[in-house]
Amino acid sequence: MAADVPSRARYLANLNAQSTGAGDRTATIVRSLKIDERRFGVSHPDADLSVVGGVFDTMANATARYGEWAALCQARQALDERGMASLAERMATGELDASMATIELKFARAEQLWNAALATNPSLKEVATLDRHALVEDFIQLERARLKDSVVSILADHLAQLPQGAQGEMKVLRGEIGKKQQHMALRKLFRTAPAAIQRIKPVLLMSPISVAQFLTPGVVSFDLLVIDEASQVRPEDALGAIARARQIVVVGDKKQLPPSSFFDRLLADGDGDADDLDDEGEAEPTEDLLGGAAALGSSESILTLCEARGLPGRMLQWHYRSRDPSLMRVSNAEFYDGGLVLPPSPLERDPAYGLIFTQVAGAYDRGGRRDNRLEGQALVARVAEHAHKTPDLSLGIVTFSHAQKNTITELLEQARRDDSALNSFLREGRSEDLFVKNIENVQGDERDVILVTVGYGPTVPGGVMSGASFGPINGEGGERRLNVLFTRARLRCEVFASFDPSQLDVSRASQPGPRILKRFLEYAKSGAIEQPSLTGELPDTPFEEDVADVIRSLGYLADPQVGSAGFRIDIGVRHPDRPGSYLLAVECDGATYHSALWARERDRLRQDVLEHLGWRFHRIWSTDWFYDRSRQVERLRAALEAAKEQDLGPLVTSGANVPIAQVSQTEKPERIELPAVVDRVMPPYVRARPWAASSIEPHEAPPSLLVPMILDVIAIEGPVHVDEISRRVAAAFGKKSSGRRIVAATRQALVAAKRQSAGIDNDREDFWFTAAQAAEPPVRDRSTESGATFKADAISVMEVRAAIRIAREDNPGGEDAELIRAAARLLGFSRVGPDLHARVSQGLD
């Protein structure tokens, strides 16, 4: 036994020390210790004693390793006890080393777990034959259909609640809609018909100044206020809108431009920013709507004020605009600490897309016009080329100064006279017209292609740039102007400059703007901020590595982990003829797939984003790869060949200015018309007609006969007065009217019915009804009724209130008299007499 090894070792060691010769030592050992065939490998007791002696000599000379041997024996015993004797034997014979044995054990364990799962859930046996591609496609179709159904449901709910009446505020609105001229002022209209306007248009898109101008305080309020581009909204401008809302959502980027300080400087006589105002010019601390006493002037925007008040915030990490990540890399590194998720693009290595640097032999007119005309001419030539080759891509031009903006505008007007294509491109009326703006006022704009002219540069063509003076970029907040500039383009941003970025000396710049601009220009020229597509990381799993090896064996270049942190494609397959672009994105259900929190992201959103950026998509499921490898390899080969055959040239993405004829008519927003004035028709009043198969008098009938009749009457006519119920009981026995005795018998039967059934109840006026009728009182049209049923006293206050609610919905803001008339019409009365007026008036409470 393994436990006896130390004592045996000491015994053998003593024998070895006491013996004088090898032969005597061996003989002593053999006589003293019975040979253990299993432990020492001796085939039978008569084995050669010299062999046995050699074994014991080796053991005796390595007594320090007997502990290891004991542990090995214990481990072998543990493997045997756990049913892994064959694995231990293969290790003992040298067939498997430790690493291979570990792999074998993991595979065996996984297989055992799979078999146990199959035994517990037999439906898992279908996984091997399940078409996961069809399953995902069904999920995508159903999920998209659900989104469309949600839109239809929301629109249907909105249309269903549109007011249909012509009284109250609706009378005012319909009158204004019918006018051709002399319309009511908007502020007065909002003050006169606020409820009707919000019912018809529950969402208003307004600027802060429009809210103050058109919405009278205390008249219109909102459940939710969303402030977009909050970094551009002053606190004093936003607080008026905030005061009208119950909840706010503030969306903005404090790394972009704050509100313009032009008027602040004007009021301060040009003595500096608002911070330079003396004590008399500062706002006194007031109790603001966001809590706490603060001077609103101390916060540059409502965004910074909300952050100062500790409102909970969340960063929106997915960057949606740029379809080439190189357009956002500098901003992501400089302003967002690499926190933005930039989906990879198949065009990242295509020189026609992304960030481009063009050096021009221009000269900055420092003392005269303060522009760079040669640089402007090069940019205008590029605009003309764009108009000829890619007119469907929208275009924007950004300058670093107002003088350069005027120069570009002048050069464009001159060039369009001799170029019909350029002239047509510059005409207004496209989805996104060309703009020429300076860096100060371009925030909020975006285009497919952005052309940037720096303007500043050497004073002679081809000269050396001295210093690093770039106007507003050198001032405080200049880096925020650059961040706005960097993020305007969707497909391509081309920067024109009259100097090489390496010439810039930013060591003496006191603000970060020049340094960031230099880094931006260097990256535009060389792309050397980081590798844009290859992360340098290995595949996440051996499964992905195996797929990549198969792709390479098919003659294609396969790059693992394409993209940036947060959004990586498992394998990007390069185009064999254009290695700068990708032919196919291969996604595996590996670590990236399983790390997604919900099925929508795993199976639809990621693929939609990739396909929107121009990727061709191919997915491989691990179960299919393991169970049917040859078929999946052939499927992968077919996908690669199909992608190559379908590729007819460089990938060209669609722009914003596609011809209108190509836009589907179903994509146009549906116009919602105000419903025409219609008289709402309620369901007619229905009388119950019970029948008694008895010749006895109604007042002599037992409760067992009357209770079912009464319950039937209440179910059909409730809420109904006791006198009406007694008339139905009398009619059931063939009587034309109900007397005092029939009414008394009916009351007794009602008490018994209430005691027997918890589903009926009555009010103080003796109207009886069911629980369902109490929850949703019916409103019935009595225009075809006559007699007592048509009297005002026969209508319960419960039904009157329900009619008043409908009248208010159809005529929001209506006065009491108008609501009474509308409710009476719903109840089937064409004229409102004194009795009916008094009855309906009770429902106004």
Image (cartoon, helix red, strand yellow):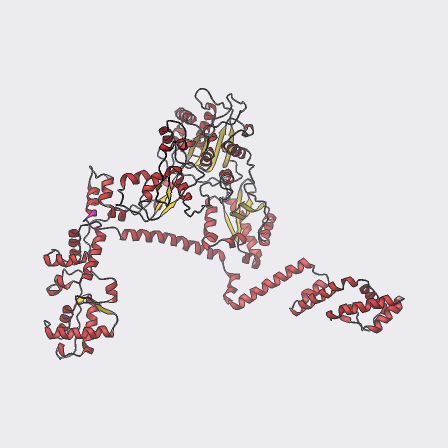
The answer to whether any part of residue 364 appears in the image is yes
Residue 462 in percent (x, y) is at: 53, 23
Residue 229 in percent (x, y) is at: 39, 40
Residue 345 in percent (x, y) is at: 50, 43
Residue 629 in percent (x, y) is at: 57, 56
Task: Answer with left or right where residue 455 lies relative to residue 261.
Answer: right
Give me the residue at 51% from left, 61% from top: 127
Task: Answer with left or right where residue 292 lies relative to residue 778.
Answer: right
Give the answer, above or below, for where 169 lies relative to 368.
below
The answer to whether any part of residue 41 appears in the image is no
Report the magenta residues as a range: 164-169
- Viewport quadrant of the N terminus: bottom right
* Chief SS of the magenta region: loop
Residue 532 on the magenta span: no
Give me the residue at 36% from left, 45% from top: 290
Give the answer, above or below, for where 697 lies relative to 231.
below
- Viewport quadrant of the C terminus: bottom left
The quarter of the picture where residue 630 lies is bottom right
